[in-house]
Amino acid sequence: MKLRSPMPELDGATEWLNGQLTREDLVGDKPTLIHFWSISCHLCKEAMPDINQFRDEYGDKLNVMSVHMPRSEKDLDLEEIKKTAAEHDITQPTFVDSEHKLTDAFENQYVPAYYVFDEEGNLRHFQAGGGGMKMLTKRVNRVLGIKQ
């Protein structure tokens, strides 16, 4: 996805955990952070506390949503996805993308991966891989209009 691209529709989930969202739920209200992760990704699990902190600290100003993107057959086990989500306190809505429909719509190839959209639903920042939370925090704060 290129910067300034509109957020894709949130279609094709095999399952939703913690509530279901549509694109319309996320656009027009406040900025959105969409986080791609996988149960087989160690870096994803290390980043969970940071994502949960975004959710908890910015909850009234920022939509936070997760996408579980499987990387292997083993990652398709829904019970394991639910268990890992619970173990890592993932309480935000989570799109289970077992058929890679949303992954393809985002043209995403990485976990963890982070997409920050402004309140109009346009992509303002993308980043992938472990670490880089300071950069992600800066970009989220910029979209929220918080001075640093």
Image: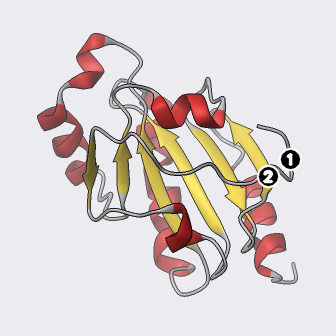
The residue lying furthest to the left in this view is: 79
Which quadrant holds residue 139? bottom right
The residue that disc 2 covers is: 125
Left or right of 15 on screen, residue 123 = right
The residue that disc 1 covers is: 3
User: Where does the image place residue 143, in percent across and percent down from the top left?
Assistant: 80, 72
Q: What kind of residue is marked 1?
A: Leu
- In the image, residue 29 above or below residue 32: below
- In the image, residue 145 above or below residue 89: below
Of label 1 and label 2, which has the lower sequence position?
A: 1
Looking at the rendering, in which quadrant would you find the C terminus?
Answer: bottom right
Task: Judge by depth and name the residue closer to the eye, 102 or 144.
Answer: 102
Label 1 crowding class (10 Å Cα cut-off): few <14, some 14-19, many 20+?
few
Label 2 crowding class (10 Å Cα cut-off): few <14, some 14-19, many 20+?
some
Q: Residue at x 86, y 53 (%)?
A: 4
Q: Are marks 1 and 2 in contact (CB under 8 Å)?
A: yes
